[in-house]
Amino acid sequence: MNFLKKILSKIESKQPQQKVVQESTDLEQTFVQHFVQKGGKFLYCTNISEVVENLQNILLENQWDTLNCISKELTQLYATLTVKIKPEISKDYPILTKCECLIAANGSILFSSNQLKNNKIHELNTNFIVFAKTSQFVKNRGESLTAIKASYKKDLPTNISAIDKFSPKKIDDNFMNYGNNNAKNLYLLLLEDL
């Protein structure tokens, strides 16, 4: 009898893990579907060397030799590349940055002052390269704000905003968005970390 209890408890303990993996996969698929439909460029990477290789290909494809990047953590991505890094955020060069969350419900990417300082997205360069991890997926904007609160506790970032359009040339005819176009030519380098 104890033997059956042990087997059943092992099976039951594995089910929640399988459910979490399934939910994570569903979020990824939903996000990618929305992101690509909106014109985002998605590059899935299983390790850092693939991230660096994809970053190099992006730079070559677009003939970019200079990037803006304020994240010291991203040094490992560009350290071996022959690209100039401007440790600031400006309109002059494409931006290499991290993000806060990847929002599955609409395929948008959430940023804060930790990535963009006090700059408004629509005032920045049209070209973005975003480095993110699969652990950053959330279902919707509500969960993204909850994730930010959980991550930063007392020192909450400011300037929380999202990029949810990835075709800068496409005109948004919704009168509610007039003058507020934050569309970017965006590459997402997504690293598997789960």
Image: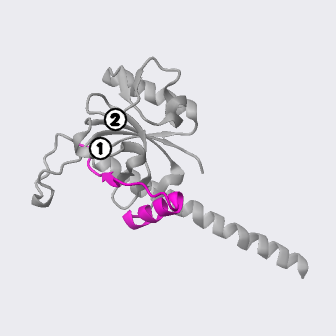
* Sequence order check, earlier mark of 1 and 2: 2
State the residue at coordinates (66%, 69%). 15
Instruction: Please state which amino acid type lies under the numbered disc 2.
Output: Ile
Q: Does the magenta stretch include residue 5?
A: no
Query: Residue 172: percent from the left, percent from the top?
Result: 14, 51
**Along the horizontal axis of the image, is 133 left or right of 42?**
right
CB atoms at circles 1 and 2 under 8 Å apart?
yes
Instruction: Indicate whether 3 appears above or below 46.
Output: below
Q: Residue 42 carries which label?
A: none
Quadrant position of residue 174: bottom left
**Magenta span of residues:** 139-167
What label does residue 119 carry, if any? Answer: 1
Label 1 element class: loop
* Left or right: 72 as drawn, with respect to 60: right
- Judged left or right of residue 79, residue 129 is left
Tag 2 residue: 89
Q: Which residue is painted at 28% across and 44% down in the image?
A: 39
Task: Residue 139: tell me if it is visible.
Answer: no
